Image (cartoon, rainbow, N blue to C red):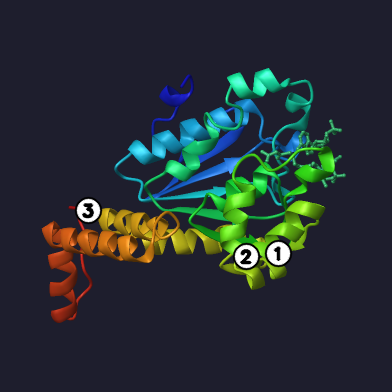
Amino acid sequence: MGNVAVLERQDSGAATLENVIVEWIGRVGVVTLNRPQALNALSEGLIRDLENALDHFENEPGTHVIVITGSEKAFAAGADIKEMVDKTYMDAYLGDFITTGWERLSQCRKPVIGAIAGYALGGGCELAMMCDILIAADNAKFAQPEITIGTIPGAGGTQRLTCAIGKSKAMEMCLTGNMISATDAEKAGLVSRVVPLDQLRQEALILAEKIASMSLPVAMMVKECVNRSYETTLTEGLKFERRVFHSTFALEDRKEGMEAFIGKRKPVFKGE
Ligand code: CAA
């Protein structure tokens, strides 16, 4: 938690931690993975900085949506192999490797958009899949190459990839380590769309700003309900959705949204 104090909203709009750059763009928080010398390999330090940035944006009431991105060459080339190479089974097991910090992204309650350019490999692909919406640049490449270095995906690859693209494609990727292109990732349903590299950031921000203009609690409820579909049966998921739908009737934003529609004006959501 050492860096959290640094992350007060900066007048300059940006702050640089050792391995990530943090930006405040209106109601959108942007985290850029920034370890170019290692293609954003996910070292302990990078994961800790990412966790701190996410903690900050989750706790900051003014931030409604988070965007995570990397460099043009790499979103992230995976867990840091140089840090892993000498680990023993006991190091991995007792330290619960790939848990602390790594799971923070999947626990975010605010919507998270992944803007992916270049390599999203191994843990990088897994981190991307923890986001709610993925936009890929046309140079993005996705793979789970762990088998080629004698291990298996450890941050959810076998599970989230299978949910996202189905068994046959997930098996082929995990068993061969082959990369798929942005276009194939879109066809398979891994990403929602592909944009030219030079428009990636702008497209992600436009999407983020649109979501950020909605009622924050309602956006968070939508996220919670969609995610529930991965965890439960249809009957239970529908019940959960119905109850959350009912709870929107406790919100002023719900009344405002409906009155604005009837009054033929834009709603002004206050997040309450
Ligand atoms: N860990 C540590 N360092 C890495 C790295 C990684 N995952 N990926 C790249 N780097 C480093 C390289 O070692 C190199 O450093 P040096 O300059 O000090 O040699 C630097 O980044 C640039 O990389 P390359 O020279 O290899 O660049 P390239 O353009 O020739 O190749 C690449 C790019 C195809 C992405 C290649 O770097 C690569 O294959 N990387 C490893 C990909 C991988 O296997 N990822 C899975 C890791 S395991 C995992 O993620 C487990 C899990 O499920 C959590």
Horizontal and vertical percent position of residue 186? 64, 69
Category of crowding for the residue at label 3, using alpha-carbon neighbours closer than 10 angstroms: few (below 14), some (14–19), many (at least 20): some
Secondary structure beneath dot 1 equals: helix
Q: Position of residue 120 (x, y in %)?
A: 69, 50
Camera sees residue 140:
no
Which mark is nearer the camera, 3 or 2? Answer: 2
Residue placed most toward the observer, 243 or 62: 243
Kindly indicate whether the residue at mark 1 contacts the one at mark 2 (C-beta within 8 angstroms): yes
**Closer to the eye: label 3 or 1:** 1
Q: In 3D space, how far apart are the residues under numbered discs 3 and 2 (Cα atoms)?
A: 37 Å
Q: Amino acid at mark 2?
A: Gly
Q: Could you tell which of marks 3 and 2 lies nearer the N-terminus?
A: 2
Q: Is mark 1 within 8 Å of ligand 1?
A: no
The answer to which quarter of the image holds residue 19 is: top right
Quadrant containing ligand 1: top right
The image quadrant of residue 260 is bottom left
Q: Residue at label 3?
A: 271
Mark 3 or mark 1: which comes first in sequence? 1
Q: Which residue is mark 2?
A: 166
Q: Which mark is residue 269?
A: none
